[in-house]
Image (spheres, helix red, strand yellow):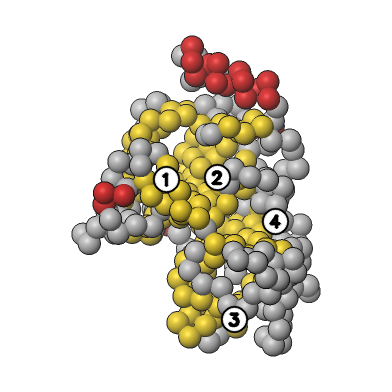
Amino acid sequence: MSIRPIKRVSLSQPVIEGAGVHLHRAFGFGSTSDFDPFLLLDDFRNERPDDYLAGFPWHPHRGIETITYVLAGTVSHGDSLGNQGRMGAGDVQWMTAGRGILHQEMPQGDAQGRMHGFQLWANLPASLKMTAPRYQDVSSRDIPTVTDDDGTSAHIICGQFWGQRGPVEGIAADPRYLDIAVPPGKRKTLPVEVTNQAFAYVFEGAGSFRNASGLKPVQTDVIVPGGGSQVDDVGNRSLVLFDRGDEVVVQAGEAGIRFLLVSGRPLQEPVAWRGPIVMNTADQLQQAFAELRDGTFIRDR
């Protein structure tokens, strides 16, 4: 068994998207090779309704999948195919945009005005970029939660983990999407498929991703805001990109640690990306935007 060293640690950065939604971006709109097959991760956590209620009005997608995971508040959605609904706390929507869809997402806070969730973008391989759009809407009650003997828990959204399989199926990159919580002071070893890219995004508590002894960090080529080459504890809104291996080791701090652990098989294909559309070539990208302009973007086949 080989523990994954850390390639890079960074903090998510504040950005404004949609009609004025204040959120934090963990990665996206940069080099795609490090996170392949994933393109972007946004943390839309906010306690000020004025900073999120304008939402994400009608916008297109082609060539990707968008995965929305809600932790607090609700997100109402609708699309050009007539689908509509509302996601609440713990719910997931895995949307395969395929050849093209127009949709909108409008967040609303809970009774205290809090809104929290994540949106992850996953690339589609060239063979599926023009497939028919589809949704997998998953209620929180259908997401299995497994708790180990030491109190570590895993919500399994997608993929096989600890003898359970998440409800999202049929995804080309064979991803695993987990919400992991490790209790205070506990050290946990988590399996990761050796051939897959993997990252962790910490959103509660703090801890360290260490070697088996727990005595030394195992990070290599670590980049952190302000410079430096060593990182011990990582906390809220920290993104940890792992190198190769088949295990991740995490040591929880005094308050415990909760994080997304996401992995997937790299597509290793060329990427032509502009805004919400991701294709393989510049010509395909230009064609998509030309179709948006002339009203032929939404296709029957």
Mark number for residue 271?
A: none
* Residue that badge 3 annotates: 251
Q: Residues within 10 Å of mark 3 (few under 14, many from 20)?
A: many
Q: Which one is in front, 108 or 51?
A: 51
* Residue that badge 2 annotates: 121
| Tag 3 secondary structure | strand
Q: Is residue 254 left or right of residue 232?
A: left
Name which residue lies at 54% across and 65% down: 238
Q: Residues within 10 Å of mark 1 (few under 14, many from 20)?
A: few
Which amino acid is tagged 3?
Answer: Gln
Choose the circle earlier in sequence order: 3 or 2. 2
Q: Nearer the viewer, mark 3 or mark 1?
A: 1
Q: Are dots 4 and 1 in contact, CB under 8 Å?
A: no
Give the percent coordinates (x, y) of residue 276. Answer: 52, 34
Q: Residues within 10 Å of mark 2 (few under 14, many from 20)?
A: many
Q: Quadrant of the N terminus?
A: bottom right
